[in-house]
Image (cartoon, coloured by chain):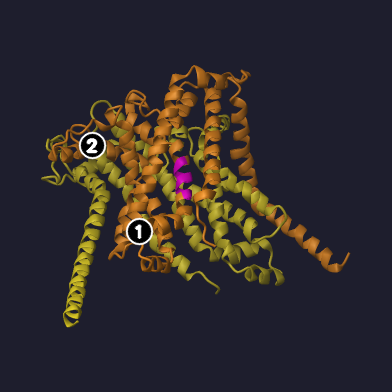
Chain colours: A orange, B yellow
Amino acid sequence: MGLAAILKSRKTRRDMMWGLIFISPWIIGFLLFNLYPTLASFYYGFTNKALIKPPEWVGIANYTKMFTKDDLFVKAIVNTIYMVVFGVSLNIIFAFFTALLLNMEIKGLSVYRTIFYLPTIMPPVAGVLLWLWILNPRYGILNYFLSLIGIRGPAWFADPLWSKPSVLLMGLWGIGGSTVLYLAALKGVPVEYYESAMLDGANWLQRTLKITIPLVSPVTLFISITSTIGAFQIFTQSFIAGGENGAGWPRDSLLFYAVYVYQNAFRYLKMGYASAMAWILFLIILAVTFVMLRSSAHFTHYEM
Amino acid sequence: MATTARTSTQSRMQSAVYYRRIRVINEILKYVLITTIAILFIFPFLWLLTTSFKSTTEIASIPPRLLPKVWQWKNYVKAVTYIPFFKYMWNTVVIFALKAVGAVISCSLAAYGFSVLKWPGRDAIFFLVLATMMLPFQVTMVPLYIIFTRLGWIGTFAPLVVPSWFGYAFSIFLFRQFFLTIPHELPEAARIDGCSEPRIYTQIILPLAKPAVASVVLFEFMWTWNDFLGPMLYLTRMEKWTLSLGLLQFRSQQGETVWEQLMAAATLTVFPAIVLYFIGQKAFIQGIATTGFK
């Protein structure tokens, strides 16, 4: 063996040792706070684990119960899918639209951008409480504005039919993060593309459909995946809107998946059952992300 | 021949006027549209602020008053005494500070191992780091709670703080991306001069990474300020509560919600976050601009 090779292997060994030393805090954290809890929760899912009681094996009973005997579980899934479908699509449409507006030559762009971004800084608890006040059925300002144009506003959070749209409305207020991402992508579209399209006589709609939307599709994919994962885990809104009436109020219309997992784990102390549900959530999120990434190959355009 | 030439110039002039007019109208429409949307976005903040200064009778007046007749500064005094506001704020700040210090140290260390150093298996392990981001909190929530119960940590800040001291994907990624922009000649030259890895990390890499440190600290602040589920799970005793939990006290007490005081407390909660956002935005951009090969 040549001297260079020995040196190289010694250097590699040295670098590996230092590499492992530097990442050792993460390795310990990964084992303690990620790997062990994940495996433990997988195991608990097949038991009737409660907080102090040692777990007893129950096989797949938790999983069969979920899909055959638990009406609330089905309700939580339906409610959550509602939020995923409408929340994600509204987020994308409005964020793209506001980014398009901001991308036009506008004086004071940074002011507008700050205004759109500011609501995302609002702590969720304060944000939900503020919207409960804005959407107050009797004294709320929104229903007052609606009454000015002759519309009798709904009871919003207090009405099972309107509670989910209330959460969606609140979500729209917080699209600033997506808007900023879209805006950055729009700024990256070369002006020459538009210029040559205009020479070919393409109108605004054609340019948007054929140039802008394909070129920002990587951002659309990113927002779709992150906001889908977010929507599957909606918790705070429901928990606070429910208040003393309990999360899910009114009439379980805001009973979302993450809320139901929490209730089972810490209210009914059915930790085995809650773990089984958490694993189903994990699998759903993995599957949805996988499908999105896979199907994106057909419509996502990456510039080389 | 002459007449056709004249009409064509005429029509050309007319269409020029026409197009200019359309452009002006477009221009006006653009600003009307964007300003309307901006007002819709800023309005909830204004409503938060004005409500916090209203009297109890103005809160319940129909139709609602846009502005208070007399600005009730005492709402703020009442709000911070109705709940131990500053106690909760202090708790939140302590949790944030402890988390931020731990995250900066542990995540930058790991990022150093994942970027400045080259070793076999490095990228496979880094993929594992990123994969942990896919794991929903719900999955680890129950076993973590059981571990923390066994350790006797429930009711203390430890379950919220300690995990940050062992590094986590988002900030490791952030530091790593930043370290990759540092020219590798820098640590290499130091190595040839006999500099040890810990010294390269503390004396060369970390001082260059101030903007990355600043953004991790900023993110930690936002997360701590915003967190609700974590404190609700672990902070069982009221004297340990954070602001997010404290705000709920205005609702959960017997009887009607005291909206004006709640809005005053909410304003005080949001205020530091907004101030930090404006300071941080500048510092962050400056930091990126001033980093370089020095």
The quadrant in which residue A256 appears is top left
- Tell me where the magenta segment starts and ends, as one range: A221-228
Residue A225 highlighted magenta (yes or no):
yes
A162 sits left or right of B138 in the view: left
Q: Residue furthest front?
A: B1
Whether A47 is drawn above or below B179: the answer is: above
Instruction: Please report the residue visible at 61 percent of the width from the left and 43 percent of the height from the top.
Output: A29
Question: Residue flagged by tag 2: what amino acid is it?
Answer: Trp
Badge 1: how crowded within 10 Å, few (<14), some, or many (20+)? few
Q: Which residue is mark 1?
A: B278
Disc 1/disc 2 C-alpha distance (Å): 28 Å
Whether B155 is drawn above or below A5: the answer is: above
Residue B121 highlighted magenta (yes or no):
no
The quadrant in which residue A242 appears is top left
Query: What secondary structure prevails in the magenta region?
Result: helix
Q: Which residue is mark 2?
A: B259
Say which quadrant the N terminus of chain A sits in: bottom right
Badge 2: how crowded within 10 Å, few (<14), some, or many (20+)? many
Question: Residue flagged by tag 1: what amino acid is it?
Answer: Phe
Please indicate, yes or no, whether residue B183 appears anywhere in the rendered image: yes
A67 sits left or right of A177 in the view: right
Which chain contains the residue that carries disc 2?
Answer: B
Which chain contains the residue that carries disc 1?
Answer: B
Residue B137, given in percent of the width and then of the height, sits at 51, 37
Whether B204 is drawn above or below A289: the answer is: below
A19 sits left or right of A143 in the view: right
Earlier residue among tags 1 and 2: 2
Instruction: Please report the residue visible at 79 percent of the width from the left and 64 percent of the height from the top.
Output: A8
Q: Are marks 1 and 2 on the same chain?
A: yes
Residue A64, given in percent of the width and then of the height, sits at 55, 19
